[in-house]
Image: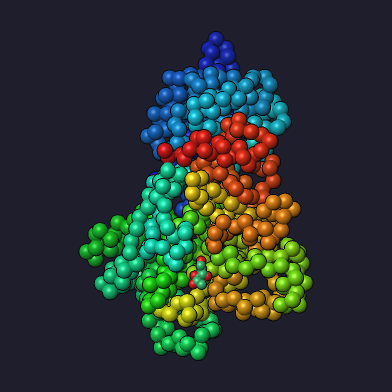
Amino acid sequence: MAEHPKIGIRPIIDGRRRGVRESLEDQTMGMAQRLAKLYTDELHYIDGEPVKCIIADTTIGGVSEAIACQKKFDTENVGLTVSVTPCWCYGTETLQMDTRTPHAIWGFNGTERPGAVYLAAALAGHAQLGFPAFGIYGKQVQDADDETIPDDVRGRLLDFAKAGLAVAQMRGEAYLSMGSVAMGIAGSTVKDEFFGPYLGMRNEYIDMSEFYRRINEKIYDEEEYEKALKWMKENFTIGKDYNPEKNQHPERHEDWWETCAKMVLIGHDLMKGNPKLAEKGWAEEAGGHGAIAAGFQGQRQWTDGMPNGDVMETVLNTNFDWNGARQPVGVVATENDSLNGASMLFGYLLTNTPQIFSDVRTYWSPESVKRVTGYELEGHAKDGFLDLRNSGSTTLDGAGKATRDGKPVIKPWWEVTEEDQKAALEATTFHPSGYEYFPGGGWSTHFRTSGEMPVTMCRINLVYGQGPVLQIAEGWTIDLPDEVATTIEQRTDPAWPTTWFAPRLTGEGAFASVYDVMNNWGANHGAISYGHIGAQLITLASMLRIPVNMHNVPEDDIFRPRAWTLFGTADVEGADYRACKNFGPLYR
Ligand SMILES: C[C@H](O)[C@@H](O)[C@@H](O)C(=O)CO
Ligand SMILES: [Mn+2]
């Protein structure tokens, strides 16, 4: 069982005895216990285990108890804390003085005791001391004996915890570059000054030649390989060869399947290690690289002579394999675009669902669709859409063939059923890869993502002199009539995974039109998550001190540390930049 970061819950109380403290003990500790129950009932780690909470041994009425609590939390791998209180307490005497851990404070809105006054005092302390905290305070007054958690408070408590858990689960993990820079893609130039100071992650590197070595010397689990190969050949439908004139060597398809199956196993072992390798005498290789995220360069060099990395990237990202439903191996970025990989990681840790990697390929206006296909766009697509299509792969879950209450969704792996797996496989075809781009052969993963799924596309960009910024676009996948879809696909690369995306427009700035969304997109790739998670991404970004340069999240839904308002309340976007600059990256 993995050692996951816990949520530390700190019941804060007025330390004055002779009646004050005594009168508050049950209510205060009760808030902590109810919050722990909320978290363990509602939240999971990426492996599916319920989130673990730990409560201080006593209520915290002063610095000695705050120190005792901090010592306890330090031994319990606490990754984020929430302090709860219904009353006045002694501000900086009761703070958790850990500058790298996300903190939130829930001040009970009940007027019998001044809980909100403590909340404000403590948040002022956090701001003054330089480790800003999140403030949570319900809109309606509750009676002192009211043990419910109101919806507005519940929402904030959960959003804080999801983002805080993402921060904590990233820390200490690696991004593994399998290869180097793909075709001059800036995101492939891996910047450890981003991964370390901002995410607390390490950067690991292997050369793609390691795949040759491991294939040639059989440094993989050969039994597992036979299972994987059998499963792929039984379940991966071969699609049309769009390059017949280039004669994609049909006699080599068997070799491609064998190589691709080996690459899946080797990619897994490089990221996570595999004790089976030690049994074969490969002790060092058995250790792996501790990677929660990785990227495969592929193009060029490898793909000029060897089967491409599509199948590997697809299977490692997907919620299932030949052994059935299982946690994705991690997030794997095509073309080693580490910034898109980090963006995928944000979505993955916030939702526990696999992420779609796509090129942001084409803006299709209603006029262009009409001219080319004769079709009048409607519904979410009425203002146009973006053709998101990856020259690499994307998770099979991205086909959106799993359903919940009859609607297409992308699920956490522990909810994936046999039917979901079957539906995703049946919706996907593996085509001989385009010879012009991939002369080494291999397969391209094709499906059309089901429409009408709420999704969020995001992307981290690095700016000289500024550092990382995050952009976010919530919207929907869309369906097109088959003949319209086919016409459009045939103009592009029909063998690649197709996701059509209609961002939600606000009529202003980067969201004035679908064209503006694409015109403001900071790079060639986007990371797409199931669900409208823009608000949670904004919360996560603020914890990591990464400013958000573009989003279409309603302002009321934005939840950042209270100190952000001290950098301006009229210009919320500018305040975000000023606050992030001021506090600096979390791990420096
Ligand atoms: C055409 C190139 O080979 C593809 O790799 C290109 O479409 C990309 O994916 C660039 O991000
Ligand atoms: Mn690409």
Tell me residue 406's x, y (percent): 67, 63
Tell me residue 243's x, y (percent): 51, 85
Tell me residue 104's x, y (percent): 55, 33
Q: Residue at 59%, 67% (x, y): give it.
A: 361
Q: How is the image coloured?
A: rainbow
Quick one: quadrant of the C terminus? Answer: top left
In the depicted view, which residue is nearer to us: 84 or 128?
A: 128
Q: Residue at 38%, 62% (x, y): give it.
A: 180
Q: Residue at 34%, 67% (x, y): give it.
A: 208
Query: Image height check: is 167 above or below 59?
Result: below
In terms of image quadrants, where is residue 538?
A: top right
Residue extending furthest toward the front: 465
Q: Residue at 59%, 76% (x, y): give it.
A: 492
Query: Image height check: is 111 above or below 137?
Result: above
Q: How many marks?
A: 0
Query: Image height check: is 254 above or below 517?
Result: below
Q: Is residue 548 among the parts visible in the rendering?
A: yes
Residue extending furthest toward the left: 281
Q: Is residue 28 among the parts visible in the rendering?
A: no
Relative placement, left or right, of 87 versus 392 is: right
In the depicted view, which residue is nearer to us: 241 or 571?
A: 571
In terms of image quadrants, where is residue 373?
A: bottom right
Tell me residue 269's x, y (percent): 35, 62
In the depicted view, which residue is nearer to us: 139 or 477?
A: 477
